[in-house]
Amino acid sequence: MICQECGQKPATIHFTKIVNGEKTEFHLCETCAGEKGDMFSSPSNFTINHLLSGLLNFNGAGTSIGGPSTEKPLRCETCGLTYSQFSKSGRFGCVDCYTSFAGRLDPLLKRIHGNMEHSGKVPQRSGGKIKLKKELQELKLQLQQKVAREEFEQAAKLRDKIKQLEKEIAHS
Amino acid sequence: MSLQRFLQTAVSEWMNGEGPDSDIVFSSRVRLARNLRNHPFPLLATDTEADQVVQEVEQVVRSEEFQNLGRYELLKLDNLSALEKKVFVEKHLISPHLANESRNGAVVLSENEAVSIMINEEDHLRIQCLFPGFQLMETWKMADKIDDLFENSLDIAFDEKHGFLTSCPTNVGTGIRASVMMHLPALVMTQQITRILNAINQIGLVVRGIYGEGSEVAGNLFQISNQITLGHSEEEIIENLYGVTKQIIEHERAARRSLLEHNKLQFEDRLCRSYGILANARIMESKEAATRLSDLRLAVDLGLITGFSAHIINELMVLIQPGFLQMYSGKELTPEQRDARRAKLIRERLSAALES
């Protein structure tokens, strides 16, 4: 059979497309099939994400695969993406997915990157906020300790500091 | 449209420009993946949300600080024809994903096309800088500067532990993908390439075809990039790629020398035959064209064929692609018309270069 597109070379790629029940057959040579590109992109489109979804479905040895789960599916409250949807597409739905799926994330990142923590650029504006937030956490911890020890005078000072810091964070 | 005039508008500066080691490293590229904190990632965004992202980015691009960098223009993908999109992909200005699958996708281009910022690709922002030759650090600095400008006025998704948050966990952290496009014909001819590519894969770098993920290697052009984005700083990632590229350059140079020393006549014959075919063929498929042009480029680099400058061949490598050919002809072409058109374009360009 000769390629229907160029009519020169033997057709080596045979392909049937069915759209709304309408059947179209294609018989193309490799060159024309390659140049048609988009139509045949799906099989050659094996990307990192396909590999990734393999990794994501890997629950570790020993965990059972079978049996219907009665648990509520793990879902991101902000965008509604479930973990099983994520594991199919390999894409998160929103920023909060990182928090929602936090429990499953570390082993995954470890497998992909060999690391779990960022050590590169910190953006100036939102990065500054991160520093303040860290300080805030520290102060809150101190406050709890002071209250536990009934050192109320110092606790009050800390409380004022925390309020001040929270204001700063809210305004930055 | 005359060929000269078409070329003026078709060729990006990185194809013309000379850069360090540009006989082997054609271009250096850095792209940063960034997202806006308060919008769902493009995959889940509604059309309205996606449009909002475009508007927010557009505001930054129109700001004075941004325009001080040079002239930037924002183009919406919906306003481009299918052919124009194809040409943008062939020029590496946008990804096939943005061209074909994005909703409310847009791209911000610098005048010299060294900077292209994709909006609503897989991530809200993909800042890409493409420089000629081997200049990774400079390319990163440019991308870093543009990133800062966006961060000044947009709420970029970043967390302390995971760094820049991206739609795909393979990009999280620095969100950086640094790559070099290398022309390695002598390593292919001497069959050392497989060994070298295997070694590259073992040290956290990936080799791809010239159109990125999933694309095929053509014309002995290899795109080498980092795979790991989390846990190393941008500078470490770039230095690692720089070091490896430097070594591959040395290997390629050594292989070229050895071919010249040991098999000069056969080697020269092979390259000059390709030239003969390019200068005379009436039908030229894109794959063959890529291979022959690779031969010609090597012959020019080694001084075996004189009269052409290397950038003419760079240009041709881009111009012979289906989208460009059809743009040049001003109409859609069947594959066999394309092969004839391609052969004609190459003949014309080569003979024009010899006359000038």
Image: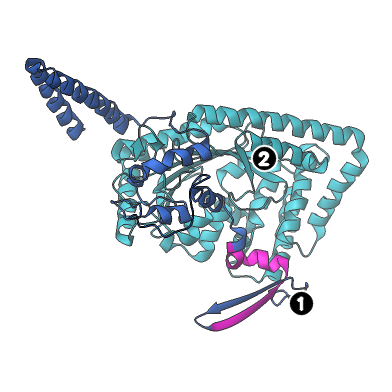
A21 in relation to B104, above or below: below
Observer-nearest residue: A121 or A118?
A118
**Left or right: residue A12 compared with residue A126:** right
Mark 1, chain letter?
A
Q: Is residue A32 magenta?
A: yes
What segment is highlighted magenta in the picture? A22-42
Q: Measured from the top left, where is residue A59 in percent x and y?
A: 49, 47
| Residue at screen point 24% across, 27% down | A137
Q: Measured from the top left, where is residue B236 in percent x and y?
A: 53, 27
| Residue at screen point 77% across, 52% down | B292
Observer-nearest residue: B308 or A116?
A116
- Chain given the colour blue: A
Closer to the eye: label 2 or 1: 1
Amino acid type shown at disc 2: Met
Mark carried by residue B348: none
Q: Residue B204, located in which quarter of the rendered image?
A: top right
Q: Residue B306, located in which quarter of the rendered image?
A: top right
Disc 1 element = loop
- Per the picture, the main secondary structure of the magenta-coloured stretch is helix
Disc 2 element = strand
Q: Is residue B58 magenta?
A: no
Can see residue B300? no
What residue sits right under mark 1 in the picture? A2
Distance from disc 2 to disc 1, alpha carbons, whole Å, reads: 37 Å
Amino acid type shown at disc 1: Ile
For label 1, the crowd category at 10 Å Cα-Cα, with few meaning under 14, some 14 to 19 and many 20 or more, is some
What residue sits right under mark 2 in the picture? B182
**Left or right: residue A37 compared with residue A121:** right
Observer-nearest residue: B226 or B48?
B226
B115 in relation to B138, above or below: below
- Chain given the colour cyan: B
Badge 2 and badge 1 both on one subunit: no
